[in-house]
């Protein structure tokens, strides 16, 4: 089964991986994705 992702979804995944790998902070990720830090925390769970 092939799953396709939009450019926006690919960027979101890349930013969340950067947070998980401690390359950027949750605050910076929230700024990049235009979300709250709480939403970033929820997405990382």
Image (tube, rainbow, N blue to C red):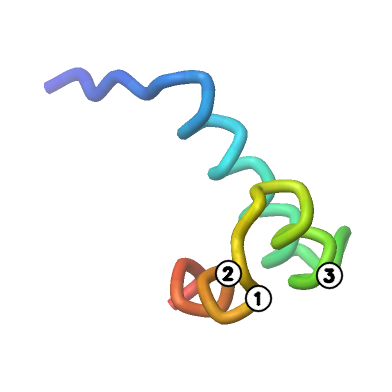
Mark 1: few/some/many CA within 10 Å (<14, 14-19, 20+): some
Q: Which residue position is annotated with label 2? A: 40
Marks 2 and 3: CB-CB under 8 Å?
no
Quarter assignment of residue 36: bottom right
In percent of width and height, residue 3 lies at: 24, 24
Marks 1 and 2: CB-CB under 8 Å?
yes
- At horizontal 58% and vertical 69% (from top left) the residue drawn is 40
Q: Check the image and report above or below for 7 versus 36.
A: above
Which callout, 2 or 3, points at the residue further toward the start of the chain? Answer: 3
- At horizontal 73% and vertical 63% (from top left) the residue drawn is 19
- At horizontal 87% and vertical 59% (from top left) the residue drawn is 23
Residue furthest out toward the left: 1
The dot on residue 18 is: none
32 and 23: which one is in front?
32
Q: Which residue position is annotated with label 3? A: 25
Horizontal relation, residue 41 to residue 20: left or right: left
Q: Which residue position is annotated with label 1? A: 37
Horizontal relation, residue 21 to residue 7: left or right: right
């Amino acid at each position: 089964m092939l799953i396709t992702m939009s450019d926006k979804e690919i960027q979101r995944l890349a930013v969340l991986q950067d947070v998980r790998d401690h390359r950027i902070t949750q605050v910076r990720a929230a700024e990049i994705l235009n979300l709250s830090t709480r939403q970033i925390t929820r997405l990382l769970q």
